[in-house]
Image (cartoon, rainbow, N blue to C red):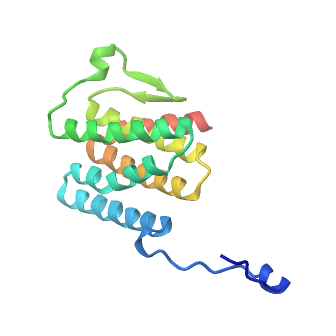
Amino acid sequence: MAWKKVSPEEALKPKTKRGGGLTTPTTICILCSLFALSFILLSFGLDNPYLILIGFFPAVIYEVIRTAGIYTKAASVIIFLLTILEALALKGIIRFNLAAFLDQETAYIKGYWLPLGDVTSVFPMITIVLAILLFQRTAGRYTKWLSIIILVSSVALVWQIDRAALTEIIREYLRYQL
């Protein structure tokens, strides 16, 4: 391929990119946002927390694909695994009370004290902490966007499952911040 001769004015002009259709990161993040939001609303309408998991699962998968650092990749893979385990716990396949097993009411995870109890409420709380960690540690705007989708969906999931635990984690977070 031969080099094309351009004038200095043409060289300084930004080149416009042609849209990639539905495969651009912006489009994928918009679709993930709309999908998660619609399933959150549907979940509250039908009183079915399992729908929230279905709604934000595409964002979790895309987050695993997009993260590159060792800690952010580990956090996104753990979120992926916790989402699958949460689905199993909501279906009743996994039944486990961490507070009774550890003989503690709270646990210190990545700088946050989380109330322990049934895994159906603990797994999304850990996902909230990891989504905050992803938001703080990732550099890309799309991975931050995806972490916000995961964070909002996880908060909605905990709200649907155990409002008292969500209130406690918010109270503890505000106490830590102030």
Image location of residue 166, percent across then percent down: 38, 40
Farthest-out residue, right: 8
Query: Which residue, as the protein is rendered here, is positioned at the far left?
Result: 92
Asked if residue 141 is positioned above or below residue 107 in the image, the reply reads below
150 or 102: nearer the viewer: 150
Rendered residue at 54%/35% (across/down): 71
User: Residue 23 at what x, y percent from top left?
Assistant: 43, 68
Residue 15 higher or lower than 27, as above or below:
below
- Can the viewer see residue 69 in this picture? yes
Q: Is residue 160 above or below residue 19?
A: above
Tell me what residue is drawn at x 45 percent, y 63 percent. Answer: 29
Residue 170 appears in the picture as rendered: no
Give the residue at the far top of this rendering.
103
Q: Closest to the observer: 105 or 36?
A: 36
Q: Is residue 68 depicted above or below 172 in this figure?
A: below
Residue at 44% in and 50% down: 65
Identified at 40% across, 63% down, the residue is 33
Viewport quadrant of the N terminus:
bottom right
* Residue 69 locus on image (x, y percent): 57, 40
Residue 98, by quadrant, is top left
Q: Is residue 94 left or right of residue 73?
A: left
Residue in front for this viewpoint, 161 or 30: 30
Question: In the visual, does 61 lie left or right of 5?
Answer: left
Name the quarter where the C terminus is drawn: top right
Query: What is the count of numbered marks?
Result: 0
Q: Relative to residue 95, is residue 114 drawn left or right?
A: right
Percent coordinates x, y for residue 25 in the rendering: 49, 64
